[in-house]
């Protein structure tokens, strides 16, 4: 049985995406405010502060990319292309879209892209 994204499913995904878009935007605003806040630290706390800011900068980058994915997914809904892999053009697994409505690639492509990007990733792992 082939499961393809039907109108009802897409409407549900769109709702999820809009909610997520709102959440991510709010989180980003909050983090950016934190980053813009006056830096006034005791010398002893300097390292922690720098670490916090680095962590936030990295988180902002992650969220910005997520927001982009969400926007791309919303646009593809408008164009009637939702659920199609941006890399190979095959349908994205429904199960995958359910857990990750902003997925723009099928599982195979996603894995491949991750495998490729891992090779270029800096040594230090960021652990949230
Ligand atoms: Zn694909």
Image (cartoon, rainbow, N blue to C red):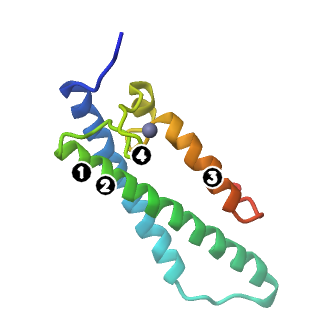
Q: Is residue 85 above or below residue 55?
A: above
Percent of width and height locating residue 6: 22, 24
Please tell me in which quadrant of the rendered image residue 27 appears.
Answer: bottom left
Cα gap from disc 1 to disc 3, whole angstroms: 26 Å
Q: Which residue is mark 1?
A: 75
Crowding at mark 4 (Cα within 10 Å: few <14, some 14-19, many 20+): few
Q: Which corner quadrant of the figure contains ligand 1?
A: top left
User: Disc 3 on helix, strand or loop?
Assistant: helix
Q: Nearer the viewer, residue 111 or 24?
A: 111
Q: Is residue 57 above or below residue 7?
A: below
Picture residue at 38% right of the left edge, 59% below the top: 68
**Can you see residue 54?**
yes
Crowding at mark 3 (Cα within 10 Å: few <14, some 14-19, many 20+): few
State if disc 3 and disc 4 touch (CB < 8 Å).
Answer: no
State if disc 2 and disc 3 touch (CB < 8 Å).
Answer: no
Q: Which residue is mark 2?
A: 71
Q: Which residue is mark 4?
A: 87
């Amino acid at each position: 049985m082939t499961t393809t994204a039907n109108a009802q499913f897409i409407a549900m995904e769109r709702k999820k995406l809009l909610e997520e878009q709102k959440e991510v935007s709010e989180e980003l605003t909050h983090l950016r405010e934190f980053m813009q806040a006056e830096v006034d630290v005791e010398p002893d706390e300097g390292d922690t502060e720098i670490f916090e800011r680095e962590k936030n900068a990295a988180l902002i980058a992650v969220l910005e990319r997520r927001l982009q994915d969400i926007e791309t997914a919303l646009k593809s809904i408008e164009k009637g292309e939702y659920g199609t892999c941006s890399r190979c053009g095959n349908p994205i697994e429904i199960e995958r879209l359910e857990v990750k409505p902003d997925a723009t690639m099928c599982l195979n492509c996603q894995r491949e892209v991750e495998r490729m990007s891992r090779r270029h990733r800096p040594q230090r792992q960021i652990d949230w």
